Image (cartoon, grey):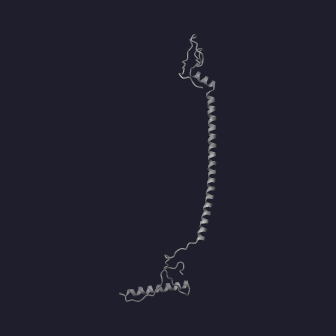
Amino acid sequence: MKRKGEDETMATQAIAAPMMGGLSRGTEWVAEHNAMLMAAQRRGRRGPTPEALFTKRIDNSRLVKANDPARAREMRSFAYAMAFFLSLVMGYGWQHFSAIECGYRIESEKQQMQQLEEQNRQLRLTEAQLADPARIDTMARNLGLTAPQPGQVVHPNAATDSASGSAVVAESHPAVPAMH
């Protein structure tokens, strides 16, 4: 068993070999001494028994999974239950968010209706102010207009009087009678 923080190197015993030059003896002794110290530290951490780790290659390519009909039935029923549960949650979420969206739409329509009612009220007020006969009379006098003289006013539906010399309005007679 490998402990946490332990490095992957293992101490080995150095075998003396004839080297060229006298410098190799000093470096060999240092390497051997370091290896001995590391082995002592590992023994101190692990206890009195040295551990050896070996790797074993396992080939599972020839294994075949046996079919388990009971397990397959359980998994199928679990999948159906989860699909049903998910559809319930999705249906609830759809309904909830649709209700929220409808609420926002209703509020928007209410605001638009209030704006249109206010605009309608403003337009009726403006129409009443513009159609005031006193205002029209004042504006006409400011523009230099006066009251009409008798005979100046022509009524479109009035009977024509050629003897009095009053103005005659042109009339049109359709070729095809209008259907009512």
**How many marks on residues?**
0
In the image, what residue occupies the spot 63% across and 24% down? Answer: 133
In this view of the protein, which residue sits in the foreground, 82 or 47? 82
Left or right? Give the position of 11 relative to 80.
left
Q: Position of residue 165 (x, y in %)?
A: 56, 11
Position of the N terminus by quadrant: bottom right
Q: Position of residue 62 (x, y in %)?
A: 49, 76
Position of the C terminus by quadrant: top right
Q: Is residue 91 above or below residue 40?
A: above
Left or right? Give the position of 163 relative to 8.
right
Q: Quadrant of residue 136?
A: top right
In the image, what residue occupies the spot 60% across and 61% down? Answer: 83
In the image, what residue occupies the spot 63% across and 40% down? Answer: 113
In this view of the protein, which residue sits in the foreground, 57 or 112? 57
Left or right? Give the position of 114 relative to 59.
right
Q: Position of residue 143 (x, y in %)?
A: 56, 22
Q: Position of residue 75 (x, y in %)?
A: 59, 67
In this view of the protein, which residue sits in the foreground, 18 or 34? 18
Q: Is residue 1 above or below residue 177?
A: below
In the image, what residue occupies the spot 62% across and 60% down? Answer: 84
Q: Is residue 63 above or below residue 15?
A: above
Q: Quadrant of residue 130?
A: top right
Q: Quadrant of residue 142?
A: top right
Q: Residue farthest to the left?
A: 20
